[in-house]
Amino acid sequence: MTSWTWEYDGYEPLDERLRESLCTLGNGYFATRRALPECVADDVHYPGVYVAGCYDRLTTEVAGRRVENEEIVNLPNWLPLRFRPADGAWLTPDTALILEHRQVLHLDTGLLERWTRYGLAEGHVLSVRQLRLVHMGDPHLAAVRTEFTVYGDALDLDVEAALDGGVTNSGVARYRALDGRHLTHVHSGTAAPGTVWLRCRTRASDRRIGLACHLTAEAPVTDAHEPQRAVQRLRLSLEPGRTVTVDKTVALHTSRDPAIGDPLRAAADRVAAAPGFDELLASHTRAWEQLWRRAELDVPGQAGRILRLHLFHVLQTLSPHTADLDVGVPARGLHGEAYRGHVFWDELFVLPYLDLHFPEVSRALLRYRHRRLARACSAARAIGRRGALYPWQSGSDGREETQQLHLNPSSGRWLPDNSRLQHHVGSAIAYNVWQYCEASGDTEFLHTMGAEMLLHIARFWADSATYDDHLGRYRIRGVVGPDEYHDAYPDAEKPGLDDNAYTTVTAAWVLARTLELMRTLPAPRRLELTERTGLTDGELEEWDQISHSLYVPFHDGVISQFSGYRDLAELDWDGYRERYDDIRRLDRILEAEGDTVNRYKASKQADALMLGYLFPPSELRRLFEQLGYRLGEETWLRTVDYYLDRTSHGSTLSGLVHGRILACARRAEAWTYCEEALRSDIADIQGGTTGEGIHLGAMAGTLDLVQRGLTGLETREGALWLDPVPVPQLSSYGFTIRYRGHWGVGLRLRHRQLEITVPRSDRRPIEVHLSGRALSVQPGETVRVALPE
């Protein structure tokens, strides 16, 4: 294993789902799980093919209610390629003798390599080597090369390749009560000698899908069209020690694609024009080389290896190809069916990384939100509010996709799901708009689509705030914070909590930033915006008043997560750890016992502490001062300790957030949480969830932890601001960024020294603020600055 490979030796059925997720290949348009081509979907293996933004909506009777569910569609499986001794049984690792099994994911080239040695009857040994790619240059192509070598006597080998349209969405056990049969009208045929096709549609969204497959081998290929499958067969005559190769090249299109007519015709034309495997691999490798140059990351040791794997999966989900698509950030990547492929607030952890490497991708992901602004405004009107209420879970068209019920696997009961009350997703969108524009300098976006989103999100918060005469402040009631464990007060008839600190403070931030933007907009654009939205000076004055007088509760010298938090019971943490060992999902444990986590001071993940993740200490202090509160360092550190003792870390984002907060506070235990964030998927710390799809927010968040968290990097006021955090476990690291037209700006920290390199260009110098001093770094210049002890 090297710093550029991810390897697994041996065949472990219990680990297959995890390995399939972590070795998924994709290109930002579509992705394919690392299922073995000779295996079908069962309790061990789960092939999955997902196109970004390809959803379908079905209705199922669940617990006496009709549940409507939209999810990303598992598309026809292009992988199938099985083999057997002539007229014998098909070989799989589950049914045949395995002498050796190994797979290597080559991160630098986006290539999956697999070796298996099957022990056969009469002393035969069949060696199978496969190379698989999902093309990063041409997003509609994929290919797999299979090399067969027999040892012992000669052997005739039957090979069958297929395109399988008989697939369903069944990769997540707790969703299997829901209808997952999304594909219909499955037909197959032959396009040309050696080339077959398969077409189908999604049942409700009526997305048309076309696949074409070309098979190249040393033997004649025959076609057979079975129900829901396009099949190709051949018989190879293997001589001992001589390798015989079969290449399978596939093209995939859907009716969502731009610049095509019929997706089947597009797929057939594309596969016909595709070069051979060697040429495909060469162009695919070049495309990956370019991506790695733009996202250069140099971190030593095991942390560096994991970060590179994380970056690999971020790039496979959100590549430059994504810039041409109408898609958001799928919380579980294109790696599985968990969360139904929905878009949550995870972009809050993803876009800050992309902003400084692939700003065109960030812009496209924000445009996904802007296209759904009208739907968000309709959602706000539906609850009697003005402005924009973005959904907690989004899919194809921007309506609220959060399920009404969710299954607790610990009790087997279906329970009401109130997470749609996490209205703070709007603040996350506003934050990402602002961060993107600061990093890219894209004033055109800020003044147009960005301004429209900020205005409507600010308007929603202002209209959500109600004045409390007793407190003399405005309050935001009936929401759910990032914690997610708490969705109601104990024994309350209605869900929702009052004065959630995170929601309130970020709402104040949105209001203040929007007012700042309105003051600086060019006069003609401001006039356009106010005319289109009916915005008045009186409304802006009200926003200013609310942004200075929202209520944030405190108790015992710390920020209260929400009003009434102080009155909740303390949990017997030691007792529950002794009884259950893993209590990350404490909510499920308590519900199975007939109790509810709403009764306790216990959090799933950072809630109030998320404020310290978004805002550096100086800005957080200013925000509280804006609201009329003093947030000294001592109060903040007490708040950090208070919630650290009461958090079960039931989310992969939790370790990430706590690691960054503790690093900023220069706390020795920071790296422990950073390591947990790094390990969250590779070690599957959530107990089986990674096999359902990687956690994209946690992966991108670890990259941003190095990029912004440990360097203290901020992009504001047209400059880079740096305040490096000393982490003994990571004393030397470096990366490049793209900043306001400068490509490949290098930042390297080593031995209490920061090195900044700006490549030659015709751009203006970059202004850098560090350790209380301002520097101007010219294009073509390298500056080294000693850091204070």
Image (cartoon, grey):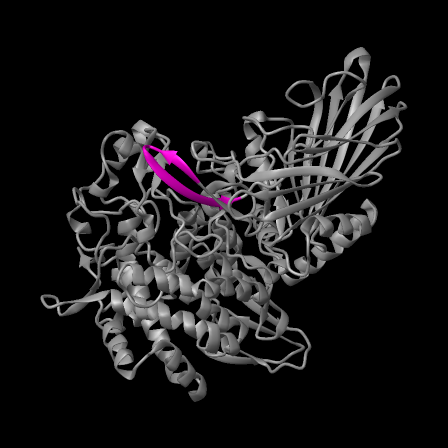
- Position of 453 compared to 590: left or right? right
Q: Is residue 631 visible?
A: no
Q: Nearer the viewer, residue 657 or 110?
A: 110
Q: Is residue 782 above or below residue 371?
A: below
- Residue stretch in magenta: 59-72
In the image, residue 560 lies at what x, y percent? 22, 56
Instruction: In the rendered view, tell whether residue 473 sits above or below residue 185.
Output: below
Residue 218 placement, left or right of 90: right
Q: Residue furthest left?
A: 470
Q: Residue at x 39, y 71 (%)?
A: 454
| Prevailing SS of the magenta stretch | strand
- Quarter of the figure with the N terminus: top right
The quadrant the C terminus occupies is bottom left
Q: Can you name the residue that lies furthest to the bottom here?
A: 523
Residue 175 in sight here: yes
Towards the viewer: 627 or 667: 627
In this orientation, which residue lies closer to the viewer: 124 or 61? 61
In the image, what residue occupies the spot 17% across and 45% down? 492
Along the viewing direction, whichever of 540 and 661 lies nearer the viewer: 540
Q: Is residue 143 highlighted in magenta?
A: no
Quarter of the figure with residue 213: top right
Residue 199, position in %: x, y? 67, 42
Which of the 4 image quadrants contains residue 32?
Answer: top right
Give residue 57's position: percent from left, percent from top.
47, 45
The picture places residue 696, in percent across and down from the top left corner, at: 51, 50
Q: How many marks?
A: 0
**In this image, 676 relative to 44: left or right?**
left
